[in-house]
Image (cartoon, rainbow, N blue to C red):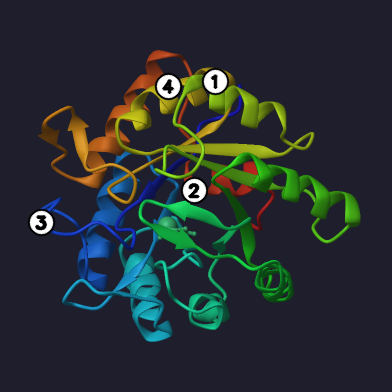
Amino acid sequence: MEKLIITAALTGAEVTREQQPNLPITPDEIADAAFECAKAGASIVHVHGRYDDGTPTQDKEVYRQIISKVRERCDVIVQVSTGGAVGMTAQERLAPVTLKPEMATLSMGSVNFGNDVFMNHPDDMDIFAATMKDLGVKIEYEVFDTGMITTVNRWLKKGLITAPLHVDFVLGIPGAMAGTPEALMYMRSQLPAEASWTVAGIGAAQLPLATMAIILGGHVRVGFEDNVYYRKGELATSNAQLVERVARISREHDRAVATPDEARKILGMPV
Ligand code: KMH
Ligand code: ZN
């Protein structure tokens, strides 16, 4: 089986220090967390910008600092968020892509997101995809619900996007697809042929869905953006602790963990 790509979603846009005291917020903290996660086996870090007071931002300068500080510390694929936070404009959200990061996310539709609505207008999605293609940024398609994987397939058929595709199933957001084994099996059954996939289970769904992905040949995303706990009632001490556990489970299943260069090869990115 292909080696396992572990993505560490370090910060997100919604989690607070009150919920997770060890949440990395500043570019320096994010770079330290990235270094620790890379050491533990992560080959991708999914990053969100925050101002020092914790407010989410898509400010290009904040992302520029994050990317350069992570690069100073270690080799890991930096994947910038274009989801940002609920309520941001599409133009705001796209700003970090102009820095030509190695990788960026692209949300494949609108969805209820807790008590909010995460809007992704089809016209904006087209612009995001075209911009990433023009700038040579590897896309990770974010799929929160079933219609979104249908859209990936439709775009592929129309030639709007081309293989190799990499899809992230984000399962367990209140308002979107459940974080259950059945939901993951259905999503996987709808993937275009040859596409690679990652699963990001939200909250308590993180560990069981990660374990399924290890067994099924998918890849895994963990981290505070999606889950702040190590187990029920016990906060994780760091993002790296969550990465270490997944790396350990994978090795127990005789599935080796990919280095950043191995991940680039698996995803069809320049090495
Ligand atoms: N913060 C969410 C509303 C992404 O990073 O691409 C969207 C999100 C997706 O986190
Ligand atoms: Zn994100």
Q: Which residue is mark 3?
A: 18
Is 226 on the left-hand or right-hand side of 128? Answer: left
Q: Are marks 3 and 2 in contact (CB under 8 Å)?
A: no
For disc 4, the marked residue is 211
Above/below status of 239 relative to 123:
above
Quarter of the image that includes the N terminus: top right
Q: Nearer the viewer, mark 1 or mark 4?
A: 1
The reply, left or right, for residue 210 in relation to residue 192 is left
Tell me if residue 38 can be seen: yes
Q: Confirm whether residue 164 shows in the render.
A: no
In this picture, is 169 found above or below 89?
above
- Provide the residue designation for mark 2: 260
Disc 3 to disc 1: CB gap under 8 Å: no
Q: Amino acid at mark 2?
A: Pro
Front disc: 4 or 3:
3
| Mark 3 → mark 1, Cα distance in angstroms | 33 Å
